[in-house]
Amino acid sequence: MSLNELTAHVLHEKLKAREITAVELTESLYARIAEVEPHVKGYLTLTKDLALEQASRADAGFQNGDDMPALAGIPIAIKDVICTQGVRTTCASKILETFVPPYDATVMTKLHAQGIVMLGKTNMDEFAMGSSTENSAYQVTHNPWDLDTIPGGSSGGSAAVVSADIAVCSLGSDTGGSIRQPAALCGVVGMKPTYGRVSRYGLVAFASSLDQIGPFTKDVTDCALLLNAICGSDAMDATSVDVPVPDFTQGLINDVKGLKIGIPKEYFTPALDPEIADRVHTATAVLESLGATVEEISLPHTEYAIATYYIIAPAEASANLARYDGVRYGYRNESPEDLIDMYKKTRSEAFGEEVKRRIMIGTFALSAGYQDAYYRKAQKARTLIKSDFDAAFEKVDVIATPTSPTPAFKIGERTADPLQMYLSDVMTTPASHAGLPGISVPCGFVGNGLPVGLQLLGAPFAEEKVLQVAYTFEQNTDHHRQKPEIGT
Amino acid sequence: MATITTEGVLHVANLARLEFNEEEMEHFTDQLARILDYIGKLNELETDEVPPTSHIHPHQVFIMGSQTEASHVAKPDVVKPSYPREEVLANAPEAEEGYFGVPRVVDRSH
């Protein structure tokens, strides 16, 4: 395998043994980017000069024989919703086309402390609102497994670049499934940590009670290494939680004997692609054969998760996106009649259709006379959804479900019908409401060759147990080793 | 739950500082009505006795040994340097004498 295809933990050993240099590794990534990025279109910004400087610094450390962190010299891509000091951060929106953050998000400070190499910023649905990355104001990202299909979303760029071996790993953000769903559709590992595990400081806010940053990787070991690097409470984010951060590699145990895995019957509806249902049942049978106890459970309020999500997330978004008014940063209409007219023209010209739709839903749900009927009602439904999970985790250690009801769909197939697009998130939003940690790992392919993801959910802060089940599954199967042949 | 009319959409658009042309208005009214119709599904739920969840922080409090709902946590008021003014203003569409510039809001004739 060429260097750009390897995992971070394998590369770390090679860097440490000085078999390879970080500069050589970084060059191999950009060489592959030159070949396949014109087909995939996963990046909005490439930062090659900066990356080579960072690689040289890592190499100096390795040459010195310094004790280098696990991610030193590892080329990583960052979703363009995470602020990167001195590097344009657009959220794939026209309204932030020229925005250059004067500061780094806390996750970036932490990654730079490890000595990573940042390859560039990845494409996404505008302000992370979408399930296909088609809502980007700049470009459509293509799924490396079939260039006519979408990569999932909203972190579609971050998933596609890892799948296409044009990044070793990447960061995305997950509000209602925006890491797990594209990971499933692109055949890579993607994890949303427990809400509060990772600082949101510098993550451009969409729905603050749901947003969480997490990794995309080629295997579960790399996932644990990235979690080690980014987790931890932060004085700059009052919602980050002050609990001890374990060494997540301790969860990399190839054994599930005695663990109880619950399969929620409500996820296996007629809307679920039968081939996906089959792959997920095959996957849980593998875990059962390795000694886990698999039992059917019930999460009775699952069917209300989408309706709840499409009130809470837009409501929070309508407040968060009020800041884009053409005053402090970004786009401004040049010829307004007055201040209010400037706000209206600026926002109407520079927000995309989906963003406007969500601002409208959210503003309506919070407006006088409707707040109790919509927003308050959704917050109560959220309690019921969360209670379902609380009860389930009294009985089981981990919950296994499909990540997405369908494999990757064709570009353009669902853009005309927002509601149809929203239903793409039916398997991932319930856990978002409850703030649970969730991972998607590759568990096979459907007949036409598109990847399928297995979602594993844990109780709050039980990431290690989720990783243990994911790792055991991965060590006993080879789905994660399959590679797409791009453009053939 | 109510259905939404064109007048309702106009009112909400004004609150959100957005504006739409006639065609977009029709399109949005239709789409919002369909989405709100779907969201109406929540009316099937009996929630009179259910407390709302605004965030999942009670976990944090639980882990720290208390069962009470997290309330506001005040941080000590420590003076720290902020970002340099020039760096912050560098992103502004219009800046003048260290301030953000906006269209005139004060009438000088009074």
Image (cartoon, coloured by chain):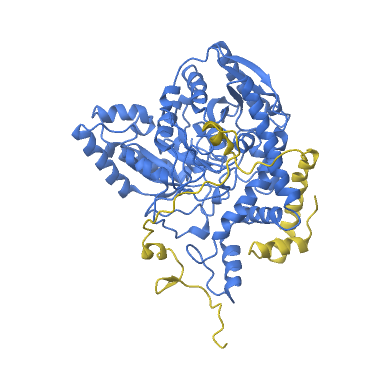
Chain colours: A blue, B yellow
Looking at the image, residue A258 sits to the left or right of residue A421; the answer is left
Labels in figure, total: 0
Quarter of the image for residue A181 reads top right
| Residue A438 vertical position relative to residue A349 in the rendered view, above or below | above
Residue at 79 percent of width and 59 percent of height: B5
| Residue B75 vertical position relative to residue B12 in the rendered view, above or below | above
The spot of residue A426 in percent (x, y) is: 66, 36
The residue furthest left is: A64
Residue at 39 percent of width and 58 percent of height: B82
The spot of residue A427 in percent (x, y) is: 64, 33
Q: Is residue A297 visible?
A: yes
Q: Nearer the viewer, residue A206 or A73?
A: A206
The spot of residue A116 in percent (x, y) is: 34, 40
Q: Nearer the viewer, residue A207 or A391?
A: A391
Q: Nearer the viewer, residue B12 or A397?
A: A397
Residue at 53 percent of width and 40 percent of height: A147
Quarter of the image for residue B85 reads bottom left
The spot of residue B55 in percent (x, y) is: 60, 42
Which image quarter is the N terminus of chain A in? top left
Q: Is residue A30 visible?
A: no
Q: Nearer the viewer, residue A381 or A68?
A: A381
Looking at the image, residue A53 sits to the left or right of residue A331; the answer is left
Residue at 69 percent of width and 66 percent of height: B21
